[in-house]
Image (cartoon, helix red, strand yellow):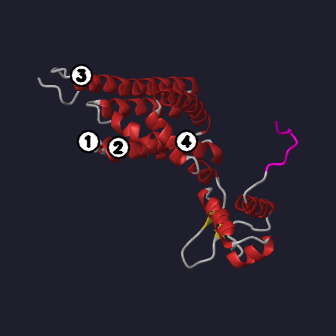
Amino acid sequence: MPSELTIQRRKLSDEVRQRLLDLIASGELPPGSVMPSERELMARYQVGRPAVREAMQSLETMRLVSIRHGERARVVPLTPRSMFAQMHQTTRHMLATSPETRQHFEAARQMFETGMVRRAAELATDIDLERLRSVLNEMRAEVGDPARFVAADIRFHNLLAEISGNPILQAVSEAMLQWLFEFHAELVRFPGHEDVTLADHEEIYERVAERDADGAEQAMIDHLTRINVHPRRRSTAKGRTNGNSTRGMPGDPRRKT
């Protein structure tokens, strides 16, 4: 049985990657700077080209460096947005394949968005309110065009987070809504749902404009509760249709009158 003190051997590429991470973290390789060439890294760390290339590819996957053909790699500035971008594909896969994860995500989103709308009601300036109203007008103009409607819907929620002035919260909002986009896009294709969503957003806006933090929070809870019910109803309708049912569910666009 191996001792807890046993030193695990690491791949050469892992060691090179860690050395480069240390250089970036220490500021020796600041954001925007050019990375050492492959030949320089091979000589510096006494390793072969495969180890250097694998280490650099790993850093690119982490979005810490940018590699372009024919150019030297550069250190990418690390921002809250780039941090969440690293989780994009994995999170979308989890949401697409795990109903339980989606339910947890919906609950987490409700906690996040209710906190954001309370802050918006407390901090919104007249300019912030003008921007929110402008997005509401966009949503109204795009009823009937699901893709554009959802894009405006997302901008509305992101603006609420932006009012906080906290870049971490802004990045969380953008990432969360981006991950849910494909599911949310399905929601607004439900007949009549665009109008419901628009009415919900109008109510949220009014409560924020009146500096009513409690009312804004309740309006957001009501909105998220409504939109979270629709995908399950839609899933049930699909299941019954796939089960050779000859009758369309209420609200199903395929229902015959």
Question: Is residue 76 visible from the viewing direction of this image?
Answer: no
Q: Residue at x 50, y 26 (%)?
A: 100
Q: Amino acid at mark 4?
A: Ser
Whether tag 4 and tag 3 are in contact, CB under 8 A, the answer is no
Q: Amino acid at mark 1?
A: Gly
Q: Amino acid at mark 3?
A: Gly
Image quadrant where one finds the N terminus: top right
What whole-number distance in Å separates the C-alpha atoms at marks 4 and 2? 18 Å
Q: Amino acid at mark 2?
A: Phe
Mostly what secondary structure, the magenta segment? Answer: loop
What whole-number distance in Å separates the C-alpha atoms at marks 4 and 1? 25 Å
- The residue indicated by pointer 1 is 144
Quadrant in the picture for residue 36:
bottom right
What whole-number distance in Å separates the C-alpha atoms at marks 4 and 3? 38 Å
Residue situated in front as seen by the camera: 227 or 44:
44
Give the crowd class for mark 4: few <14, some 14-19, many >=20 residues within 10 Å.
many
Task: Classify mark 4: helix, strand or loop.
Answer: helix
Q: Residue at x 56, y 79 (%)?
A: 70
- The residue stretch that appears in magenta: 1-8
Of mark 1 and mark 3, the one earlier in the sequence is 1
- The residue indicated by pointer 3 is 243
Whether tag 1 and tag 2 are in contact, CB under 8 A, the answer is yes
- The residue indicated by pointer 4 is 173
What whole-number distance in Å separates the C-alpha atoms at marks 3 and 2? 32 Å
Where does residue 77 sit, x and y in percent of width and height? 66, 62
Q: Residue furthest front?
A: 1
Of mark 3 and mark 2, the one earlier in the sequence is 2
Task: Classify mark 3: helix, strand or loop.
Answer: loop
